[in-house]
Amino acid sequence: MPGTYIPSGYTPKLSLYETQHAISLIKQVFQDNLSLYLNLKRVSAPLFVNPRDGLNDDLSGVERPVSFDIPAAQVSAQVVHSLAKWKRMALWRYDFHPGKGIYTDMNAIRRDEDLDNLHSIYVDQWDWEKVITREMRSMHTLHETVQSIVRAICMAQLTVRGRFPQLDVPLLCEEVTFVTSQELEDMYPALTPKEREYEIVKKHKTVFISQIGKTLRSGKKHDGRAPDYDDWTLNGDIFFYHETLDCAMEISSMGIRVDAEALDKQLTESGCDNRRALTYHKLLLEGKLPLTIGGGIGQSRLCMLLLGKAHIGEVQSSIWDEATHRICREAGFQLL
């Protein structure tokens, strides 16, 4: 979805005041249900990290982190892209045991992000991580966890619909369609990955596409994924059909994390063997970090989905180009 597009006839269903109330309600209800369903405890998390520790997430490997120096500590720091690695270290340091986990608010700046209806340079999400056993490193565990997250999202929608009956946004489908990236390529070989996502999500409404990052039989990848947090055979993205924009909206990127064997393999495949000397990677390769499953769930995107909003700037404050502001003004609404 290049640039900003406002559907013809779109009108926000809530005023700015009501929108702020609804955002607060959604966030409270969802995180309460998420922590209940996945057995998570809320913790505090960093806004920035020391790059020498190897804890920052490099996403697909091309995004530039926002960096700054700290004269008093004589080090440089990076604003986090996500907390995928930090959370695993935290579970180890806090001595969490299998079946228990953590969640936190993650706020990031992704300076290289394209600006459109779904993307902003400001990222806010719930980052969560849970300790699992070796036996739980399976597709069954992954799918079961996805179902719990989708259930928490659907419960949040019912709550906000009860408070704001004018939200006649279609109810989300709680039944998840599971498909691997290879199965999706086989279904739609002539389409691009984004076009495939749209076709299957438009048809099934709630979809989990697994095995992101691995090379497909076509020789291409469905999407990029860093080699040092998700196991590419046991990860994926949760999508919902967003009626207002007629698009597939990714709400969560998640997965069972790499063990020493998967990390060793994926670092080599990605040409990232230089990371083996970093603190996080050394601990993982030595088998000292717990086995975990985790992910991120977009806060603004979830609010946008449940409130039927056409632009992410209707539910978060950020910086937009003048063309985006003009398009929204002409459509009869303003961004936060």
Image (spheres, rainbow, N blue to C red):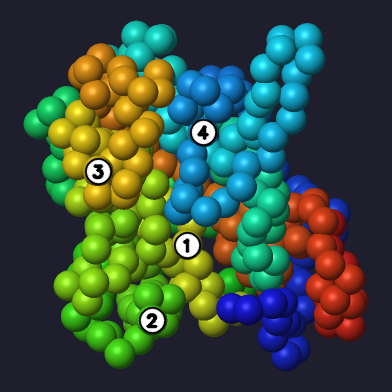
Kindly identify which residue carries mark 3. 268
The answer to whether residue 147 is above or below residue 209 is above
- The disc, 4 or 2, on the residue closer to the chain's N-terminal end is 4
Q: What SS does tag 4 mark?
A: loop
55 with respect to 333 (left or right): left
165 with respect to 94 (left or right): right
Q: Nearer the viewer, residue 112 or 22?
A: 112
Whether tag 4 and tag 3 are in contact, CB under 8 A, the answer is no
Q: What SS does tag 1 mark?
A: strand
Q: Residue 270's x, y, as percent?
A: 31, 49
- The disc, 3 or 2, on the residue closer to the chain's N-terminal end is 2
Kindly identify which residue carries mark 1. 250
The answer to whether residue 101 is above or below residue 246 is above
Amino acid, disc 1: Glu
Q: Residue 329's x, y, as percent?
A: 90, 76
Q: How many marks?
A: 4
Residue ID at (25%, 14%): 288
Amino acid, disc 2: Thr
Q: In the picture, residue 34 is in which quadrant?
A: top left
- The disc, 1 or 2, on the residue closer to the chain's N-terminal end is 2
Q: CA distance from mark 4 to mark 3?
A: 19 Å
